[in-house]
Image: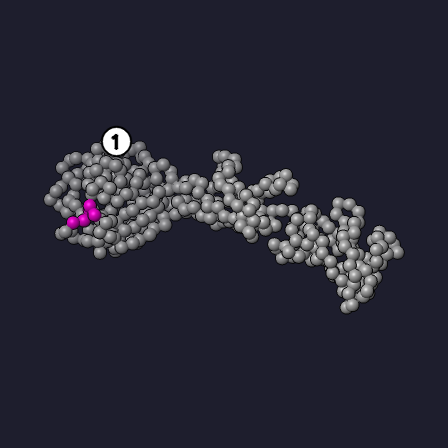
Amino acid sequence: MATNQGISLAVKPEGSPVAGHYFEDTGSFLLHGAAPSGGTATVWSAHAGGWVRAAAVTVDSTGHWRATKPVTDAGSWHFIATLGAGNPGTSSTTKSAEVTVTVRPEMIKLKPPNPTVDALKNPVVSGRVYPATGGVVVHFQVSHAESGWHNKAKVSTDKDGRFAFRFTTGTGYVRSYSVRAMYWDDRGSKWVTSSAKPITRIKVIDAVVTATTAADVADTYHSGCPVGPSGLRTIRLNYYGMDQRMHRGVIIVATRRVDSVVGAFRIALNNGYRIRQMTNPNHWGGSDVKQMEDDNSSGFNCRKVTGNPYAESPHSYGIAIDVNTRENPYHAANGTWYPASGASYIKRSPHRTGMLSKTSALTVAFRHRGYFWGGLWSPGTDYQHFEYDG
């Protein structure tokens, strides 16, 4: 409180959406102070000009006075209280010390989102308009390094000036973006824009393990198989595709092999290894030949060894994984290469996307966890195959 020569003045915001702050066209200046009882306290304000009378009130019997003035324009506001009607510019006038406050312009603020997000997930980005106003139409904009700002959505604020958008741009891409929000200010005939916030879509494996159901193995399990659904687990996880986008896949393995499989694929993902697809073999009726032709990566499948109908496949036990079957073909004991679509990959050089070698991140990760890589078998080379050998 400023006091001088028998009259004091204090200024506080009243009705502000943010305690202790003033916003244009919102709430009031609460003007109050002390002076001799029964007299008149006149409050003067100056903003981008000279002193203008803002209010005149009678000092009460306790020696206090109080007045309000609506907050209008943004910028610096100066206030002085005088006894009587004297102008503060006159030397003979009894007046308080000058009080200066700052009125903030209208603004829109985004709550900083998590700067990194799973490339397959679409987080909510929220914010608020100040001063708090309902029904304001807010536009949500997104940009990235290869483009400028683009309008993506618009919503209206609630009664407290809050709004929220779901960030859906570039789902699956591993890429950095900036987001911002803006609205049109009719009074000022201008756009009010928030500061930009970064969001980067990243590679996250997000493995979710569930008990394997009968539906999960509808075409890959039958009576007499060495392992049934109760001994299996269904893993849903993200992988980096040949299209350089993230995808959600599924692989079914023996319960005791879950941690090793998730760990190996996490290392492969972190090292940028690409996978064509990871779909439940039910999609092909459990046919290994058909899913190999379509370049599918899979685990459990209760069947005989492809190319050898007399031997039980290790896939029947949920301890084997085949990856990128086209880029990593299998040379069966009968001399046939599977799949036919992988013929161009029989020759292992030059190295191409999706191929596996002894030094591939996935190969190293699986071998470190006790798996044998079929690319080292001879005869019967199986470049796509990993099998637990513990």
Magenta region: which residues? 218-222
Res 175 seen here: no
| Quadrant (top left/top right/bottom left/bottom right) for the N terminus | bottom right
In x, y percent, where is residue 351? 31, 35
Looking at the rendered structure, the secondary structure element under dot 1 is helix
At a point 23% along the width and 49% down the height, the residue shown is 215
- Of residue 265 and residue 365, the one placed in the foreground of this image is 265
In x, y percent, where is residue 73? 69, 47
At a point 13% along the width and 41% down the height, the residue shown is 308
* 334 to 92, vertically: above or below: above
Name the residue that disc number 1 marks: 344
- Could you tell me the amino acid type at mark 1? Ser
Q: For mark 1, does the 10 Å Cα neighbourhood hold few (<14), some (14 to 19), or many (20 or more) residues?
A: few
- Of residue 300 and residue 268, the one placed in the foreground of this image is 300
Considering the whole magenta stretch, tell me its main secondary structure.
loop
At a point 36% along the width and 36% down the height, the residue shown is 243
Whether residue 125 sits left or right of residue 365 in the image: it is right
Q: Is residue 179 magenta?
A: no
In x, y percent, where is residue 21? 65, 54
Res 78 seen here: yes
Whether residue 46 sits left or right of residue 321 in the image: it is right
- Of residue 32 and residue 202, the one placed in the foreground of this image is 32
Farthest residue in the bottom direction? 62
Whether residue 85 sits left or right of residue 191 in the image: it is right
Corner quadrant of residue 296? top left
